[in-house]
Amino acid sequence: MGFMFDGGDATEPNSANVIRHNVSENNGSETQEGGMLVTGGEASIEIYNNTVYTPSSVPVLMSAESDHGVGPFDVHLHNNVLISHRFPVVRALPGPYSGLRLENNAYFDVGEPPSYELDWMGEYFGPGDAEVIASWSALTGQEQVGGSPAHRTGDPVFIAPIGSGGQVFPAPLSELAAYRLQLTPPSPLVGAGMNLMIPPQSLDIGARDFFATPISWTVRCGPDIGAHQARMACP
């Protein structure tokens, strides 16, 4: 497992947590939690600008089943790249949930051809082409902003192959090639992120991305999607 949110209870939930600017590769397995796990007793979680690749599991697993007496609520996922291989890109076990929002995330399946799946509140979508994500969005209202679709599907176009990983120590993160967005020609995720600095999110997005690149977001210029901010300045 890569990241896990678990704890708290109905009267005192574990709250105000943030996961941002991270890369998770090859976490989880068919019988274990995947790249990110959110369970009951969790509240007010912001998960944004991460890149998660799980070839043998699901990138995001959410479960309302817990010993804490309350399901997760106010969990928000924005601007993440979620990549799987013949597994659901998101699995949300039956609720109840409250305030669960997925917006402006990018989804990809590395199979040939890509085959998208979602497991959502007991209903299975897919496998199939990118229309699987669109159908799920239309039915659930997830991945929509102002009634319009707000997600991406397809190859994120990194400069190195998906799954190439790399050693992050003792070499600095700035030298790691995996999961960097390509600029020439540009990845479709460059400049495609939701601006989280402005309402309704109004988040403190930090100073550097996963690769220690200075973040150039402003109130007029949104980010790239994923853990890498390829643009050094707003256009």
Image (tube, rainbow, N blue to C red):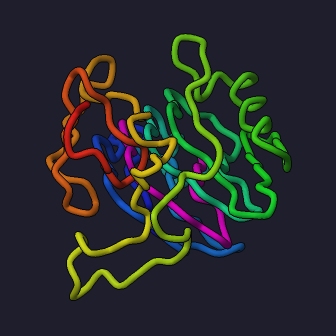
Q: Who's the residue at 61% across and 28% down the image?
A: 142
Compare residues 33 and 134 and report the one nearer the observer.
134
Q: Classify residue 111 by image quadrant.
A: bottom right
Residue range in magenta is 44-63
Residue 147 located left or right of residue 195: right
Q: Who's the residue at 43% across and 55% down the image?
A: 182
Residue 109 located left or right of residue 71: right
Residue 81 located left or right of residue 141: left
Location of residue 50 with respect to 55 vertically, above or below = above
> Which residue of the protein is positioned furthest toward the front in this rendering?
184
Q: x%, y% of residue 132?
A: 79, 38
Q: Who's the residue at 32% across and 50% down the image?
A: 230
Residue 121 located left or right of residue 225: right
| The C terminus: image quadrant | top left
Location of residue 11 with respect to 146 vertically, above or below = below
197 in magenta: no
49 in magenta: yes
Compare residues 61 and 88 and report the one nearer the observer.
88
